[in-house]
Amino acid sequence: RERGKIGGIGVHAGLWTSQALKAPIEEVPVLRRQLAELEKEFGFDPSGHGGKALRHALAALPRDLMVNLAPDDVKALVSTSISLADRPRPALMLVRSILRGHMFAFVWLPRDELTTRRRVQIGEMIEQASAGQITNWSVDLGDGDLAQLRFTLNVDAKRKTPDIQALDRKLDDMVRGWVPSVEEALAGIVSGTRATKLAL
């Protein structure tokens, strides 16, 4: 630092070995430490349901991304993943790289909603909200009811992260479609049965 301002940045770069990418979390020191810290923070018993859910959620995150995120962002991703395992629903999370020049979007969708058209639609929504550009995307079908889309975007490091709740609502509307949204709005005006008939 020079007079209270950052004058330079030192970066240490390296690659994950193929063994570290495939090994259980407990066998990779940086991941083992992260797991222990999260277990303590959440108050989960490692051998209990919460502890197992936490381990599964952490193991599902891309390992090359783990070292590029702040601990609070890893915690938020893990918390969201655990909650979706208990109550599957469309959801969206945005996290920034430590140097903020990259943004990572995690999107969970019901498997039958995962189409090329839907992926492109969601990607365009995130690009517009962030004024960024998607450089990479991937899909993880997992073994549950939800598929996970991941987008990597180049963004202006000085630009604020988009409103995640607003994007989450847009995603929900996108997935649910017109009829359920109309029915929900009508339910606030007339009875449930009448709302259903009017929506149809």
Image (spheres, rainbow, N blue to C red):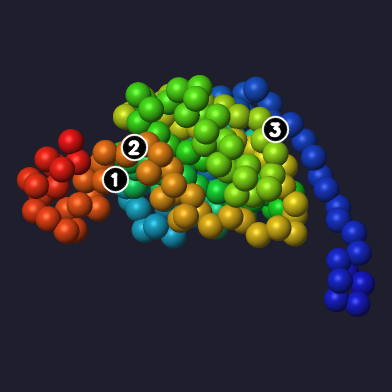
**Residue at the spot 32% in from the left edge and 29% down from the top edge:** 145
| Nearer to me, 197 or 140 | 197
Say which amino acid is labelled 3. Thr
Q: Is residue 145 left or right of residue 135?
A: left
Q: CA distance from mark 1 to mark 3?
A: 33 Å
| Residue linked to disc 3 | 135
Q: Earlier in the sequence, mark 3 or mark 2?
A: 3
Label 3 element class: strand
| Classed neighbour count for the residue bearing mark 3: other residues with Cα under 10 Å, few (<14), some (14–19), many (≥20) | few
In the image, residue 33 lies at what x, y percent? 55, 48
Say which amino acid is labelled 2. Gly
Q: In this view, which residue lies farthest toward the front?
A: 198
- Using the rendered view, name the quadrant where residue 153 is placed: top right
Asked whether the residues under the numbered discs 3 and 2 touch, taking CB atoms below 8 Å apart as contact, a structural biologist would say no
Asked whether the residues under the numbered discs 1 and 2 touch, taking CB atoms below 8 Å apart as contact, a structural biologist would say yes
In the image, residue 36 lies at what x, y percent? 48, 50
Say which amino acid is labelled 1. Ser
